[in-house]
Image (cartoon, helix red, strand yellow):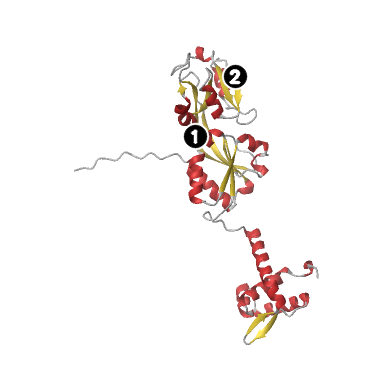
Amino acid sequence: MSLSAIDLNLLLVLDTVLTERSVARAARRLHVTPSAISNALARLRTALGDPLFARNGRGIVPTPRAAELAPVLARALRDLDHAVHGEAFNPATTTRQFSLAIADAGQMVRLPSIATRLAAEMPNASLRVVGIDTLLAGGGLAGGEVDVAIAVGEQSSGMHLEPLYRERTVLVARQAHPLVGDRVSAKVLATVRHVEVHVAPGKGYRGLPDAYARLGIPRDIALVVPSFSAAAAVVSETDWVATLPASLVARLGPRLGIRSVQGPVAPLSLTLNLWWHERTQTNPAMVAFRDLIRRATAPARTRSPSRPRKR
């Protein structure tokens, strides 16, 4: 007999009676009358060609055919329930792989705290990190390959965003640069060459070219690289300069021998947002992962100085 000829609600009744081993208890669990359970079993007996249960004193026992169906029904109904309602998410036991898109500056500065929290709160989970160029090449967050992103940008259809933290830029040069000291004039800045970062094709710092143009300072681009860390490494061994995130310079500057420089161009102030697609808005695992990122990237709170005790 084709499965389409069987009312699937009858299989739920059978599973409940197999579990409870009682028509009366099955009726209470399903919030129906015992006669409704009996009628459902009668229809199943006809459909399957098997009595399904036999009397045994005051109770009932399944036939070999019903006993054979019991584990298959239980597993199928459990899987169907998970598919319809979503499986409960347990951070302590999940083995899920999460995915995050973030530029390399964030990978250097923010990722360690994200990884630390993930290890503590979701010890069996794993994390896949990609750059912004990989995210865009895969169709963005709508493509389904990446769960969340940390990036600049403006609201777009189907997307959710939430401000995470602020980042400012700094102009950097190597420690022993022959022309650039702790401060640099517009005249000198116009003579040096620049390293520019495009975290994705054609995507550099928005507003930086305009900031130079407003002051009439030409910007001679010597090199375009796909990462901030590559720009920092190049600046450390050339007489070129670059505009980089201040947090990255604080992390890498002492190691690479580069320093921030005060100049005529005002630093950019950028908001890094947490991005996710509508498709993951209500997923329990994604809700928990986004909350973990919020807490991991939250600015450290400064403690108020303690007041001296009165004697």
- Under circle 1, the secondary element is strand
The image quadrant that residue 216 belongs to is top right
- Under circle 2, the secondary element is strand
Q: Pointer 2: what residue?
A: 221
The residue nearer to you, when weighing 76 against 300, is: 76
Residue 222 appearing in the image: yes
Residue type at mark 1 is: Arg
Q: Pointer 1: what residue?
A: 166
Give left or right: position of 6 versus 258. right
- Rounded to the nearest whole Å, what is the CA distance between mark 2 and mark 1? 26 Å
Q: Where is residue 196 in the image (x, y as percent from the top left)?
A: 58, 24
Q: Where is residue 84 in the image (x, y as percent from the top left)?
A: 65, 59
Nearest to the eye among marks 2 and 1: give it.
Answer: 2
Q: Quadrant of the N terminus?
A: bottom right
Of pointers 2 and 1, the one earlier in the residue sequence? 1
Residue at left 68%, top 68%?
A: 72
Asked if residue 54 is positioned above or below residue 174 in the image, the reply reads below
